Amino acid sequence: MTTYQRDGKKSPADGAVYGAMSTAIAQLATTPLDVLRNRIMADSKFKGDGESGDRKKPSYLERLSTIAEEEGVSALFAGSSPRVAKAMLSGALQFAAYEETKQKISEMFTIK
């Protein structure tokens, strides 16, 4: 799958493909944690406003389990499509730019 240039280096297009894939996987894997973070921030019961009393805060795993049980596992992946799409675009651009820049800087410092 990897296409190499004449000098054996990866092309910026390969960097873009690998960057898009890796950032998409990372965003998809961390979406449940992002959903949990947003729910915790929006949860008024535990904001320290004096109304929570002595109630124990549920752990992160308890909160994840509650969301999955009450709303289904798909609720943990709410908003994953736009996150993955954005990550693919930014990852592709970032890794392609990195490969191109790395090659150009290497060429500048190569003794001829």
Image (cartoon, helix red, strand yellow):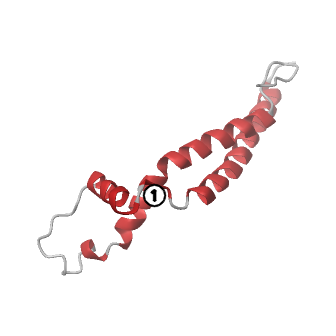
Percent position (x, y) of residue 39?
A: 38, 66
Taking the spot 61% from the left edge, 44% from the top edge, the residue there is 23
**Relative to 23, is 55 on the left or the right?**
left
* Residue 92: x %, y % from top left: 72, 45
Residue occupying image coordinates x 79% and y 31%: 103
**Residue 99, percent across and down?**
74, 35
Q: Position of residue 8 (x, y in %)?
A: 80, 18
| Occupied quadrant, residue 35 | bottom left
Which kind of residue does numbered mark 1 sit on? Asp
Q: Reply above or below: 69 against 54.
A: above
Q: Where's the N terminus, which quadrant? A: top right
Which image quarter: residue 5?
A: top right
Q: Is residue 26 left or right of residue 65?
A: right
Residue at 49%, 53% (x, y): give it: 31
Q: Which residue in the protein does label 1 denote?
A: 34
Q: In the image, 49: left or right of 32?
A: left
Q: Secondary structure at mark 1?
A: helix
Going by the picture, which residue comes out furthest to the left?
54
Please name whichever residue, 106 or 70, is drawn nearer the observer in this view of the structure: 70
| Quarter placement of the C terminus | top right
Seen in the picture, residue 11 relative to 48 is either above or below; the reply is above
The mark total stands at 1
Depth check: 52 or 93 in front? 52
In depth, the one of 59 and 76 nearer the eye is 76
How many C-alpha atoms fall within 10 Å of the one at disc 1: few (<14), some, or many (≥20)?
A: some
Tell me what residue is drawn at x 39 percent, y 62 percent.
71
